[in-house]
Amino acid sequence: MDKVLSFHQGRLPLLISMPHAGLKLTPAVDNGLVEQARSLPDTDWHIPRLYDFARELGASVVAAEYSRFVIDLNRPDDDKPLYVGATTGLYPATLFDGEPLFKEGQAPTAEVRKTYLESIWRPYHNTLQSELARLREAHGYALLWDAHSIRSLIPHLFDGKLPDFNLGTFNGASCDPQLAERLQGVCAEAGNYSHVLNGRFKGGHITRHYGDPANHIHAVQLELAQSTYMEEVEPFAYREDLAQPTQRVLSQLLEAMLAWGRQRYGH
């Protein structure tokens, strides 16, 4: 396979993961997609651009190059369901609105998909694992921020309009509760935005699997409503006027996470 991820190593104990930002397709997926999937509507659009301040901040950043339509990096490799009700799996079969993703009989074969697991999923998770281990060794702890975004209205997945900032800590299991409290405080002060902790999105596989507070790895997922920084309809344009104030809140959240780490661990 060609380049399956981009990775930047930072100097702070913070790793930002972007598992659904990728736009690349494999030939088998490209050939099989239904017409309404060709624009890659379920992508976490522009997430690297939205977080472009993070490198300057000193964070490590890992981002997927391949679309979640190929393989979903935020699902376990055994494809066990993470959520009750409507959801998508390791190899998505439907769009977020419940419509089939592939033309009948055109989905990649199990054999082909096994190659995606080995050549796309594993390198991403190996990178997460080794960088978190490096950060913990260097700093005594590691902070993981799993960065996502989603359309604010998807009736098939959730009722009503999604809050702007959806923080997930797997019901408190993936990070210290005081850290979650600190992050909620930042959201509460950002008066123009709504927020929720462990609402519809509690954190996917990455948050659940790597968050290990007892061993000083604290993981938080943010599912951001796309209405806070872009047009939610094709061609999914980035809106600088919306994105700038949202970036300020994202920056405050990451700064608060780092400040909490310094306080908690003494450096």
Image (spheres, rainbow, N blue to C red):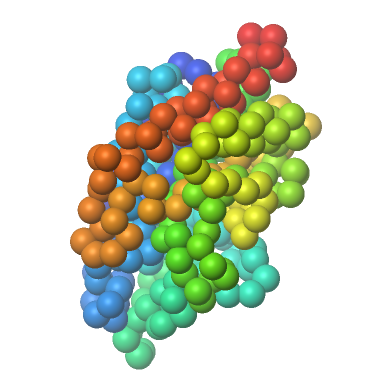
Quadrant location of residue 262? top right
Provide residue 96's location: percent of width, then percent of height: 45, 71
Q: Outermost residue, top direction?
A: 267
Give residue 139's position: percent from left, percent from top. Answer: 61, 15
Q: Quadrant of residue 59?
A: top left
Q: Residue furthest front?
A: 191
Please count the marks in the image: 0
**Residue 141 in the figure: left or right of residue 156:** right
Q: What residue lies at 25% left-to-right and 71% top-to-bottom?
A: 38
Q: Locate the N terminus by quadrant.
A: bottom left
Q: From what the image shows, is residue 35 above or below residue 126?
A: below
Picture coordinates of residue 22, whole percent (x, y)? 33, 52
Question: Residue 203 at what x, y percent from top left?
Answer: 61, 51
In front of the other: 5 or 184: 184
* Residue lying at the far bottom of the rendered structure: 104
Which residue is pictured at 39% across the width and 53% down the height?
226
Q: Is residue 65 above or below residue 114?
A: above
**Which residue occupies the foreground of this view, 128 or 267?**
267
Is 151 placed above or below 110 here?
Answer: above
Specify whether 218 is left or right of 49.
right
Please name whichever residue, 265 or 117, is drawn nearer the observer in this view of the structure. Answer: 265
Q: Kindly tell me whether residue 258 is visible in this rendering.
A: yes
Q: Is residue 214 left or right of residue 73?
A: right
Q: Is residue 26 visible?
A: no
120 or 83: nearer the viewer: 83
Which quadrant is home to the C terminus?
top right
**Which residue is rendered at x = 59% and y = 26% of the image?**
257
Please, is residue 228 above or below residue 200 in the view? above
x 65%, y 66%: residue? 83
